[in-house]
Image (tube, helix red, strand yellow):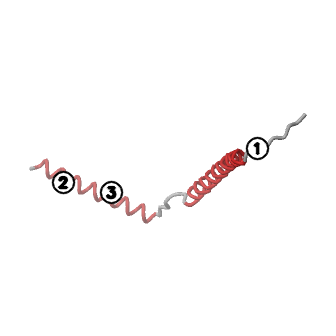
Amino acid sequence: MFYFCEVPAFVLTFVFSLTCVGEMRSNLNELYILKTREIVNSIRSASDGPIQTDTHTANLNAAVTDRASRQSILTSSTYNN
């Protein structure tokens, strides 16, 4: 035997709002995960790193060699005095 009783409107509203809040949280979590994955993938594929040409490498080698020679001149003149 079933008894039908009248459920107050505020109870139905409360239950409905809890259902909606849970669904919204689930949707927001999904959206957050999807957007994070999209951003991370775009960062990964944007650049494989700097490209060094032979000219750039030669300029770096010249700068290091020049600095080393100047450093050795300064060091030897300091100890000779």
What numbered label is drawn on residue 35?
none
- Distance, label 1 to label 3, CA atoms, is 83 Å
**Of label 1 and label 2, which has the lower sequence position?**
1
The amino acid marked with disc number 2 is Leu
In this view, the residue farthest toward the right is 1
SS assignment at label 2: helix
Along the line of sight, the residue nearer the viewer: 3 or 66: 3
From the top left corner, tell me how far across and down residue 17 is, in percent: 68, 49
Mark 3 vs mark 2: which is more N-terminal? 3
- In this image, 2 relative to 68: left or right? right
Q: Where in the figure is residue 2, as x and y percent of width and height?
A: 88, 36
Q: Is residue 54 above or below residue 22?
A: below
The image's mark for residue 7 is: 1
Name the residue rendered at 54%, 60% in the picture. Answer: 47
Residue furthest left as drawn: 81
Residue 81 shown left or right of residue 29 in the figure: left
* Three-letter amino acid code of the residue under disc 1: Val
Label 2 environment density (alpha carbons within 10 Å; few <14, some 14–19, many ≥20): few
Q: Position of residue 34 (x, y in %)?
A: 64, 53
Work out which quarter of the rendered image holds the N terminus and state it. top right
| Residue 46 vs residue 60, the one in the foreground | 46
- Contact between marks 1 and 2 (CB within 8 A): the answer is no
> Residue under circle 2?
74
Residue 64: mark in rendering: 3
